[in-house]
Amino acid sequence: PLLLFLIFMPGCGDKNNSRLFVGDRAGLLDAEQEKRITELNHHLLKELDIHFLIIILDVPAPDLDAKAIALFDRHALGKKTKGARGMLFLVDPRGKAVRLETGYDLEGMFTDAFTGYVEREQMWPFFAAGKIGPGIEATVELLVAKVLQAIKAGDFVVDQENAARGEHLSGGAGARTDVQMGDRIPQKSISTVADEFAPQPTPFKTLEKYMQALGLHIKDPDLGIYSPQTRDFLRQWVVTNAQQDNALKGLKSALQNAEIRIQETLAVIRFPVENRGASPYFLIRDDKGWMLDFHSMNQLIRFNHKNQWHFITTDHRFSFAFTDLRFDKHGYPHRTP
C-alpha cells in the first residue's frame, strides 16, 4: 500500500553495535527512531548481507562526495559482507544535501539514476517536512524492495573481483541531491480531477480508481475514494512520488490474484499469503459507495525488514476476511493445513 514506511522491527537489534548502523552526529533522531533504524539495519546485514550505515553530519561538508568516500572507507562498509555490499546514507542537514554511496557489488542494482530518483522522489519530501527518521526508513524500504526483486530474479550475486578491487570499498557510485530541511508537512494541493475519484459501487472499482490516482501522482487527501478518517490521516502523512510508483507497481503485479471478502459495509481485498509483500486493503461503504480505509490499515498492519506484512493484532473488525488462515504469534498469516 501507500503506507510504505510502517516498518517495525522486533526488539532484537544489536544495541551494543549501534554505531555500525547509525551515526547521528546532529542529534536529529529521537531514541525510538534511532533504535528502529539500528534494528532494521542489523537485520539487513544478518539476513540480506547488506551493511547499511546512516550518518547525519553536524558540520557541513565542503565536498560531500569526497566525504562519503572517506567515511565509507573509514567504517569499512562491506567488509562484514560476503562481497562489497556496503551502502552509506550521508545526510548533511546544514549543507542541505544528501548522498547515497554504494559498494561495488551494489552498483548494478543501485545505479546513479536509481539512487538519484530515490533521493529526489522519496528522501527530499520527508526531509522537507522535517521527518528525517521516517524519511530514512522509507528510503531503506525502497532499496530493500529493489534488492528483493534482484534476489527473486537471481541477479544478486557476489563478484569476488569486486570484493577485492582497489584501495576503496566503493567506486564512487551513487548520487547526491540538494534538499530543503523543513519543519512542516506541505499543504497538499486539491486535484483538478477530484470529481473523477468519488466512492465507487464495488470495492474493486475503488481500488482501480486508487491505482489511477497513484499513476497520476495525485496527493489530494480529500478524494472521495478515501474514508473520512483516512482523509484526516492523509493530511498529516508525507506522500511521495516514489511511494506512489512503488505502490502502483506492486498492485499491478498482484491484482490478478486478488480476492474479495465482504461483510455488510466492510470489505477486504487480499492476496495469496505466499505473496507476503502484498498486504490486504480495507474498505468501508456508506450510502455513496466504497472507500479505502487507510486509517484502519495504519493502525493494524506493519511491515518487517523484508517488507512482509503482518497484523499487530488479529482482533479487529476486518478479521472476518481471514477466517481461513491462521496467524502466528507475530501476526504473520499462514495457510491452514
Image (cartoon, helix red, strand yellow):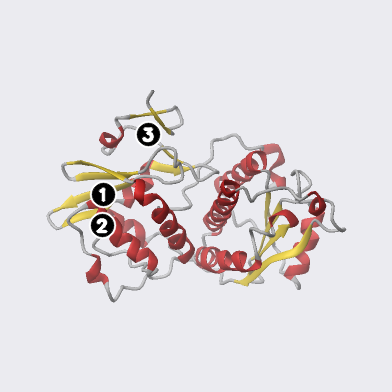
Q: Is residue 65 above or below residue 169?
A: below
Q: Is residue 335 visible?
A: yes
Crowd tier of the residue under label 2, counting other residues whose Cα lies within 10 Å: few below 14, some 14–19, many 20 or above: many
Picture coordinates of residue 294 (x, y %)?
33, 51
Q: Is residue 34 above or below residue 118?
A: above
Q: Which mark is residue 221?
A: none
In primary-sequence order, the first of circles 3 and 1 is 1
Give the amino acid at mark 3. Thr
User: Considering the numbered disc 1 on the image, is that residue within a helix, a strand or a loop?
Assistant: strand
Residue highlighted by disc 2? 206
Callouts 2 and 1 close, C-beta under 8 Å: yes
Q: Is residue 152 left or right of residue 160?
A: left
Give the amino acid at mark 2. Thr
Q: Is residue 22 visible?
A: no
Give the amino acid at mark 1. Leu
Quadrant of the image containing the C terminus? top left
Residue extending furthest bottom? 192
Crowd tier of the residue under label 1, counting other residues whose Cα lies within 10 Å: few below 14, some 14–19, many 20 or above: many
Residue highlighted by disc 1? 283
